[in-house]
């Protein structure tokens, strides 16, 4: 195995931890899942095609490992556990605290299928095709889940009551600017509170959960 391959695997660990924590809802279990993923990846390097998206390949391994774990445990993460995984370690940018908490609560109430697509495309910046490869789904299915997930997120953040009976959050209107700020904080949940605050005040460029992704 080349040092370059090891370096690339190491570079993907933060992204793997973000995805794992959002899936399993518990930091320790997420880290165990990431370790399992890396071990599997190291034993399956011959299945990786050089020059392709290593992150998508690793995410596929992680998600499959998670599904196997769920089948064994016959349990899923609770909304509260998912909130813990998405929450910053300490309050960041106090003036945005309530809005950020609303976003976290809303993400936790989405279906796993919607949340996965939003995380892969909205947070990790994957294309439709890359997300489809990770999820083992068709591109059209990914686009549909993304559209429904964004609409559900808007409705949750706006405090609407839907026909599906989901309890909506009493919320503040989700504007594009506020969404970008909130997404920046969620992206920084593994950083210190000070670092997260700097991300918000610097106006970090992140994908807006509420806007359509153009292109493929």
Image (spheres, helix red, strand yellow):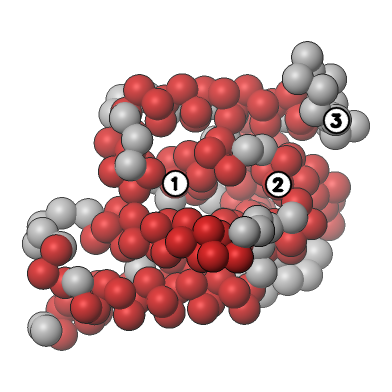
Of the residues tagged 3 and 1, which is closer to the observer? 3
Percent of width and height locating residue 166: 80, 28
Determine whether 2 is above or below 180 in the image.
below
Question: Disc 3 marks which residue?
Answer: 167
Pick the front one: 141 or 102: 141
Percent of width and height locating residue 84: 74, 63
> Is residue 25 in view?
yes
Instruction: Tell me the distance, in whole angstroms, between the alpha carbons under discs 2 and 1.
Output: 15 Å
Left/right of residue 174 with respect to residue 13 in the rendered view: right
Count residues near mark 2 (Cα–Cα under 10 Å), then give few for <14, some for 14-19, many for 20+.
Answer: many
Determine whether 110 is above or below 20 in the image.
above
Q: Quadrant of the N terminus?
A: bottom left
Quadrant in which residue 153 is drawn: top right
Earlier sequence position, callout 2 versus callout 1: 2
Question: Outermost residue, top direction?
Answer: 163
Count residues near mark 1 (Cα–Cα under 10 Å), then give few for <14, some for 14-19, many for 20+.
Answer: many
Label 1 near label 2: C-beta < 8 Å?
no
Percent of width and height locating residue 187: 57, 56
Q: Residue 108: give its label.
A: 2
> Is residue 160 in view?
no
Instruction: Tell me the distance, in whole angstroms, between the alpha carbons under discs 3 and 1.
Output: 25 Å
Earlier sequence position, callout 3 versus callout 1: 1
SS for tag 2?
helix
SS for tag 3?
loop
Left/right of residue 170 with respect to residue 13 in the rendered view: right
Earlier sequence position, callout 2 versus callout 3: 2
Question: Disc 1 marks which residue?
Answer: 120
SS for tag 1?
helix
Instruction: Tell me the distance, in whole angstroms, between the alpha carbons under discs 2 and 3.
Output: 12 Å
At a point 74% along the width and 24% down the height, the residue shown is: 155
Label 3 near label 2: C-beta < 8 Å?
no
At a point 78% along the width and 70% down the height, the residue shown is: 90
């Amino acid at each position: 195995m080349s040092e370059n391959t090891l370096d690339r695997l190491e570079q993907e660990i933060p992204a793997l931890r973000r995805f794992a924590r959002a899936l399993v809802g518990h930091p320790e279990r997420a880290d165990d899942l990431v370790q399992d993923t890396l071990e599997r990846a190291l034993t399956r390097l011959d299945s990786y095609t050089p020059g392709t998206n290593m992150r998508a390949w690793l995410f596929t391994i992680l998600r499959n490992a998670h599904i196997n774990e769920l089948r064994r445990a016959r349990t899923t993460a609770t909304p509260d556990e998912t909130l813990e995984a998405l929450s910053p370690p300490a309050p960041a940018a106090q003036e945005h605290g309530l809005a950020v908490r609303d976003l976290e609560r809303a993400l936790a109430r989405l279906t796993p299928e919607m949340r996965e697509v939003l995380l892969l495309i909205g947070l990790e910046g994957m294309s439709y095709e890359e997300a489809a490869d990770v999820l083992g789904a068709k591109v059209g299915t990914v686009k549909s889940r993304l559209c429904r997930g964004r609409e559900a997120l808007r409705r949750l953040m706006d405090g609407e009551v839907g026909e599906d009976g989901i309890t909506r959050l009493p919320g503040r209107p989700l504007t594009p600017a506020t969404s970008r700020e909130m997404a920046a904080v969620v992206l920084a949940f593994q950083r210190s509170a000070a670092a997260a605050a700097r991300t918000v005040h610097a106006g970090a460029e992140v994908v807006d959960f509420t806007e359509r992704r153009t292109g493929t």
